Amino acid sequence: AAAAAAVVLLLGTGAAVRAVTVRQRERAIDDQQATSRAPLEQARKKVEQLGTARAEAYRLFDRGSDAAEPAWKAVRAAEHEADALYGRAAVAMESAIALGGGRDPLRRELGQVFLERALLAEQAHHLEFRDFFVDQVRLNDPDGALERAWNRPATVEVKEPRGAPIHTARYERHPDGSFAAVPLPRSEVAPATLVLPPGSYLLTVGQTAYPILLARGEVRPVEVPQVQVPESFVLVPGGTFLFGNGDEDAVRSFLTTVPIHAVQTGPYLIAKRETTYAEWIEYLGHLSPAELPERLPHLTGSTMFGAVKLVPPAAPGERWTLAFQDGSGRSQRAREGEDIVLSGRDRRVSQDWRRFPVAGVSFEDARAYARWRSEHGLPGARLCTEYEWERAARGADDRKYPHGDRLLPDDENFDETYGKKPDAFGPDMVGSHPASRSPFGVDDLAGNIYEWTESSIGQPGPVIRGGGYYDAAFVASTENRFRPEPTLHDPTIGVRLCASIPPSPGSHP
């Protein structure tokens, strides 16, 4: 009896100890949950304020205001503070989970914190952190509800033109920096409603490309105006795209651009290729004898980039001549029908210079040419704005180059294309590098020569875009911009035209 009583006593004592331990553990769990609440509330309040602050900073950048950089610095600081607060909340929740044996409600709370951190990282364009946090969401998502919220589909309403076939491809971003447009096994006819997961897509509506970046849960109207498109141009419908640079601020400042953010353009036309010497010669043939010398492409004297000079016929019946000097200082002259030879190359050694992009023309020359084209066969012809140029180059997403995030030596004409040899530097005939063709089907937007555009940021004026044959791949990135003097004549700067079209009634940007 005594032994039995001792056993009962021991069992009772053990149960009591276990009960105390459970209560202590529950109190510890409650304490950790309580510890997480204050930083979580602070983080959410800061994120709510960040939306307004970020939008104001973007507005200041687009105006070219001196207040933009200080405002952006404050945004970056607030982003860091909000993420640090989320981190404190997550640590407390992880401690609660460790104490509680990984119960589903606790894990779901932690998953929600990581979901909010992922959204914050995405808005800050810290994509590697975003992807890490999304992985943490999946690990703390017992019923998959959080992942379903993250992947909530978008709705695309294609309204016009009625009866046009619609084909959809999703852009996949590969680890090596390449992009692939993977067709989806579906086709529709406008008007149609497409329900798609968030991501970057290439819609083809009739014959018109429409790159589109879809956010989770959004509803996006799409209209393609019905206009006559000249053979050498493409139509860019009105729409939204990402403009600027999403790297660290030091990189962005070097590229003299703004933090990446969504902007809009209306519909317009853009030339598939840069304006060539042949097209410029046609223009010169319509000028008066007084104006002709003023508009001749030229840059005389040796430079590290070479030199060019277009020489008119000395007498009726004679041919135009291009005087060209490569980076080594070697000069040659070629008349129409004769090739320019760049002996340091292992391919594209001999080329028809009439199909080179015209270079050595100033900003004012380029605008005068656009005015002439507007009066002679291309109504509304003008230089592209920066917004238009960058949208035509990158489509809708944040890619570094028209075709992806990497630029291989023969993707375009830049310093590595021909081995950085001085006697190999020079332009290529337009369209020689289809590997870097943009989502809209536009060539040579990363290299070959820079192109004059009209500034979309701050004060009006000239900006050159696209990089040149003497530049590194980094300089040829889509977002890089530089503001030279409008009178500059340079052998690596030329022209690409855009043209305005009247907006269709009731169209949406």
Image (cartoon, helix red, strand yellow):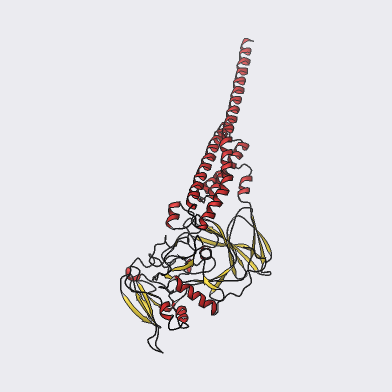
Residue 394 visible (yes or no): yes
Q: Is residue 98 above or below residue 260?
A: above
The number of discs equals 0
Q: Please give left or right for residue 191 compared with residue 330 in the image.
A: right
The picture quadrant where one finds residue 305 is bottom left
Residue 434 percent location from the top left of the image: 48, 69
- Rendered view: 35 above or below 244: above
Q: Quadrant of the N terminus?
A: top right
Q: Residue furthest top?
A: 2
Spot the residue most to the front.
290
Visible in this render: residue 189?
no
**Displayed quadrant of residue 447:** bottom left
Residue at image coords 62%, 18%: 11
Q: Classify residue 219 as left or right of residue 242.
A: right
The picture places residue 387, in percent across and down from the top left corner, at: 53, 63
On the image, the x and y values in percent for residue 436 come to 48, 66
Q: Nearer the viewer, residue 77 or 442?
A: 77
The image position of residue 214, as x and y in percent, is 60, 57
Viewport quadrant of the C terminus: bottom right
Work out whether 173 lies above or below 493.
Answer: above
